[in-house]
Amino acid sequence: MTNKKKALVIFGSPHKNSFTASICSYFTKRLTGYDTELVNAFESNFRPCIDCKKCRQSKTCVFRDMDNFDFIFRQSDLIIIASPLYNFSFPSPLKAIFDRFQRYYSEKYYLNLKLPQKSAILILTCGRQNNDKWIEIFKNQTNILLESINIKLIHTIYIKNTDNLKSGVDNLSENVKININDIVKNL
């Protein structure tokens, strides 16, 4: 048994060799103080929330497809959300996971249970160069979601203009690598 902290990576890209994958890999390989679990939103194929309100009555969901995710999520100290931005939004499989966070929201606000404090890091990639406004929108949107369930967004890492760059860890800019190394060092 390890005494390391636990990190959950919620990976929202359909591409295993994408910029999102490259930056996520570079980041997680440096998390030596954490045991890391990755959940791929596209491979998981989780059902969307149907607002049945079962989670308002107990710490569970009517759908059992996310039970393993829930187990890992509850054990994790750090949540890493890594996603490309598609058409000014998160990809739908990742959005389905976010919608299923309703069970944690219900625990806090309907069942009056105390949720443990967690930290989060948001990793975003986007194809266009001039996307600063949208990066801020996503950062703020994600922060509202996370704060509602006692998760503090502590860092956002992003790469813009990926439509015109070659993917791969070797192609990450030195500034991105330095930023990641500084973040990991201070966790």
Image: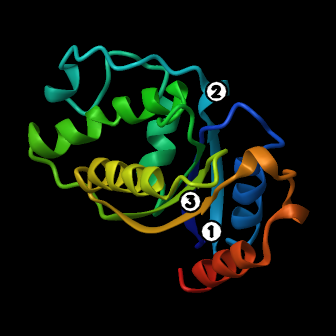
Per the image, the residue denoted by label 2 is 42
Which of marks 3 and 2 precedes in the sequence? 3
Residue 82 position within the rendered picture, expressed as x and y whole percent measured from the top left: 59, 49
Residue at 16% across, 46% down: 108
SS of the residue at dot 2?
Answer: helix
Q: Which residue is mark 1?
A: 34
Residue 184 % position (x, y): 62, 78
Q: Quadrant of residue 91?
A: top right
Which residue in the protein does label 3 denote? Answer: 7
Residue 32 shows up from this direction: no
Q: What type is the residue that disc 2 sits on?
A: Phe
Task: Determine whether 164 is above or below 90 in the image.
Answer: below
Determine whether label 3 and label 1 are within 8 Å by CB.
Answer: yes
Front disc: 2 or 3: 2
Q: In this rendering, would 51 be left or right of 157? A: left
Q: Point out the tag, 3 or 1, that comes first from the N-terminus.
A: 3
Can you say whether 48 is above or below 117 in the image?
Answer: above
Spatial distance from mark 2 to mark 3, Cα to Cα?
A: 19 Å
Rendered residue at 70%/63% (across/down):
28
Question: Can see residue 55?
Answer: yes
Horizontal side, residue 29 vs residue 137: left or right: right
